[in-house]
Amino acid sequence: MDGDGHDSNACGGGDCDDRDPLRFPGNPEICDLMNHDEDCDPTSFGTDIDGDGEEPATCCNGASCGTDCNDTDPGIGSMADEVCNGIDDDCDSTIDEGFDCVQSQTVAGTNACGREGMRRCSETCTWLDVGFIRPESGTSCDYCDDSGAGLGEELAFTASRTETFSHTGRSVGSVRCNSFGCMPPLGGRVLLNADTSNDVGGRFTSTPFQIGYGVVSVEVRVNARAGSANPGTGWAIVLLDADGGGSSMLGTGANSGVPLDREGFALEHRYADGDTVSLLQMTGGAASALHERSTPDSLSGPTGTTAAQWMRQEITPDDPSTPTDETALWGFHPAAVCVASSFPVCPSCSNEGARPCGATIRPGDRFEVGVVAGSTTNRSEVEITEATVTGAAQCPLP
């Protein structure tokens, strides 16, 4: 009927549309926008340009189309294997499936520090970053590894910081100020002693102190006065885990002036039976001596005997740039246990006899820092004349 030389299907001639002279068996199939079936074969869609045996997916007959999503590349087709190259090789509309990630792709997500970071995929479709990372900055300097390169990346944004104890600090126990009152016009001198024979007093910094990337030094100078002949009490520098909970309950008796229900450390100057300087670790409700040195008597004598004293404690936190846990080995290094009084005494305090503290102090850990004075029946008074906490390389305060 259409004069194309082929009888219709109804007459056994194979012409699928005997009204269209451009449709008959053997007619070359053309890829056109009308999806016209030129050869009466619904499974053929056009010329296989790249010769890979698959016709282009852009060529169709009705609802059926070819399977080659890129007919200019013989390596791409529905029968090809997917490889790591950032391309859909097997024409399934997915790129680099079967690999960890899409080659050279960068994706966003929340990093371990709770901030938005990026994650990069390598040329071999594996993640270059363990997690989502972002460059360290002064804003993100918080002892958390944003960059994935280690905490040491933050060092460029840190600075030393010094705090001075004063009348604005937090008081614990029985605290009585000196003759200038509780808030003297000059300085922050505070007298620590007991109104009764069994109480103790302490003064802590108003806010916790954060450990930085280096040695933190706590130095306290006092004027000690015997409230009775040959007093048996003393005073201590105390560092308490600020995030450990519990209350600052100050001890009496042998551990007078030392908090026992909080995790931490104390450097104690005790007067009984000859002066003793002890580095104590407090854990589980008990205080144990890690290091101890004897010094000459300072307040042995009648009531009113006085002595100018100072103690310094240095805290060496774990260095994040080394595989060694420095604090697990040494804790508060014994070499930092040093005391001076009215006698020219400063023990060498070498490492002999030191015991591991069994605790790790890391950059970012927070401690409450304070000075406490114990009182027993033979009590003494301690006037804080100067108390400072200096931290090396700390992150900016929030």
Image: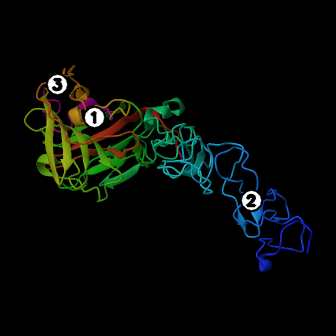
- Left or right? Give the position of 186 relative to 323: right
Disc 2 and disc 1 in contact, CB within 8 angstroms: no
Label annotation for residue 351: 3
Residue 111 placement, left or right of 222: right
Magenta stretch encompasses residue 306: yes
Q: Mark 2 points at which residue?
A: 45
Q: Which residue lies furthest to the left in this view?
A: 273
Q: Is residue 23 above or below residue 123?
A: below
Question: Please, what is the three-letter code of the amino acid marked with disc 2?
Answer: Phe
Q: What residue type is labelled 1?
A: Asp
C-alpha separation, residue under disc 3 versus residue under disc 2? 86 Å
Residue 160, percent across and down? 47, 31
> Horizontal and vertical percent for residue 294?
12, 29
The N terminus: image quadrant: bottom right
Residue 160 in view here: no
Q: How is the image coloured?
A: rainbow
The dot on residue 325 is 1
Of labels 2 and 1, earlier in sequence is: 2
Residue pictured at 24% horizontal, 35% vertical: 331
Who is closer to the viewer here, 127 or 364? 127
Q: Quadrant of residue 321?
A: top left
* Stretch in magenta: 296-317
Marks 3, 1: nearer the viewer? 1
- Which-is-in-front pick, marks 2 and 1? 2
* Image location (x, y in percent) of residue 23: 84, 66
The picture quadrant where one finds residue 213 is top left
Give the image location of residue 57, x and y in percent: 71, 57
Name above or below for residue 216 compared with residue 116: above
Q: Do the numbered discs 3 and 1 sit on residues whose CB atoms are within 8 Å?
A: no
* SS for dot 1: loop
- What is the secondary structure assignment of the residue under circle 3? loop
